[in-house]
Image (cartoon, grey):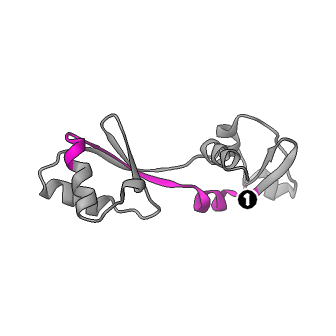
Amino acid sequence: MDITSKLGITVLISSHILSEIELLADEIGIISQGKLIKELTKEELGEQSTKSVIIEVDNIGLAEDMMIKNGYVKDSDFKVDNNEIILLTDIDSRSKINESFVKNGIQVNELHLKEENLEEYFMRLINEGI
């Protein structure tokens, strides 16, 4: 049992170091220009955060063509950064994509799911003007 529950108290922390807040807080309030723009629990942060599948392959061009041809993505659903394809999706399709790449002779060097952290979520909110 944590100290806040045990003692029945609330601890308020104000910080610009969002990585620490993400580790410590159960509930998060986001303030921009002196106004509370969002209040959410850690669970809600996980639900509202964007997810991406990061795929590192040996042949980016072939991988892009295969993903579009097989209907896994549209042009707007992914971006390419160096040797990585960043697939913007809330659906975890890693095993299906990996299987297709292997069947088509595309070597997959890395494949993982990345979830937006609190700092990235904050920046997205601010950039969207919420």
Please state which of residues 64 and 38 is positioned toward the viewer in this rendering. Answer: 64
- Vertical arrangement, residue 87 with respect to residue 44, above or below: above
Please state which of residues 119 and 70 is positioned toward the viewer in this rendering. Answer: 70
Instruction: List x then y, in percent, for residue 42.
Output: 67, 56
Residue drawn at point x = 37 percent, y = 49 percent: 112
Q: Give, as a three-letter code, the residue at label 1.
A: Leu
In this view, which residue lies farthest toward the front? 75
Residue 34 lies within the magenta run:
no
Disc 1 element:
strand
Residue 61 lies within the magenta run:
yes
Q: In terms of image quadrants, where is residue 32?
A: top right
**Number of numbered discs overlaid on the protein picture:** 1
Instruction: Specify whether 58 is left or right of 126.
Output: left
Instruction: List x then y, in percent, for residue 120.
Output: 60, 43
Please state which of residues 127 and 103 is positioned toward the viewer in this rendering. Answer: 127
Instruction: Specify whether 126 is left or right of 105.
Output: right
Span colored in magenta: 39-62
Placement of the N terminus among the 4 image quadrants: bottom right
Instruction: List x then y, in percent, for residue 36.
Output: 84, 51
Q: Which residue is mark 1?
A: 40
Q: In terms of image quadrants, where is residue 104?
A: bottom left
Residue drawn at point x = 71 percent, y = 59 percent: 41
